[in-house]
Amino acid sequence: MAPAVHDHALDLPLGVGESVAPATLDEARQTVLLLFDAHRGGVHRYVRALGVTDRDGDDVVQEVFLALFDHVARGKDRSNLRAWIFKVAHNLALRHRAREARRRRLRSLLDPRPVFDSTPTPEDCYLSGQRQARLLAVVDALPVRDRHCLQLRAEGLRYREISRVLGISLGSVANSLARALARLRRADER
């Protein structure tokens, strides 16, 4: 068995390699609780950025950490649990969003009343400041990959972790972030 590596932010033994010995339920619980305390806010913000409502975001976060408990308890790879958490959150959020879209379509077929969009009004954006509105418009206009890279970087993930979460090369992450930041800088100079 390979020697344990520590996640320096949490000082957790994370293991290395394909799999490690299954953790006791108490060890798995302790690991998940520490990671939950460290990352739940960032995971919740990330799933919200992917279009999951605040209320449903709590459910997605809970699913992520339940899956993490199962992952750790079974002794699976623990080499980069932070990236693993965000990858699972990404997948669950997209799955949840697709499921909700199907439900809305079904409801609209059953109930002919219009469904109202809950996005902020232009007045809301103006009140929050012209600069913020301009920068948010730039972020919204970014290609999906660039926007996801920027959101994960804002949550503190390193380039290599973003690469794992999105399943793209390290060079693609660097290029996406460079493009996104250049657009934000240009918009902020106006």
Image: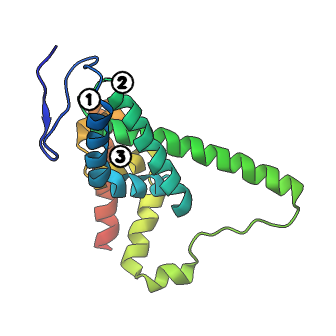
| Residue located beneath label 1 in the image | 78
Q: Alpha-carbon distance for marks 2 and 1?
A: 11 Å
| Residue 57 location (% of width, % of height) | 50, 56
The answer to the question of whether label 1 and label 3 lie on touching residues, with beta carbons closer than 8 A, is no
Measuring from the top left, give residue 81's x and y in whole percent. Answer: 28, 36
Q: Is residue 2 left or right of residue 20?
A: left
Q: Which residue is located at x 56 percent, y 79 percent?
A: 122
The residue pinned by badge 2 equals 74
Residue 32 in sight here: yes
Tell me residue 153's x, y (percent).
29, 50
Would you call the spot at circle 1 few (<14 residues within 10 Å), some (14-19), or many (20 or more)? many
Q: Is residue 124 above or below residue 55?
A: below
In space, the residues marked 2 and 3 are separated at their CA atoms by: 30 Å
Q: Please tell me which residue lies in front, 102 or 34.
A: 34
Type of amino acid at the residue the image marks with label 3:
Cys
Is 114 left or right of 186, judged from the image as shown?
A: right
Which structural element holds mark 3? helix
Residue 20 rendering spot, x and y as whole percentages: 25, 20
Give the structural element (helix, strand or loop) at label 1.
loop
The residue singled out by tag 3 in the image is 149
Name the amino acid, label 1: Arg
At label 2, the amino acid type is Arg
The structure residue drawn at horizontal position 28% and vertical position 27%, both measured from the top left corner, is 23
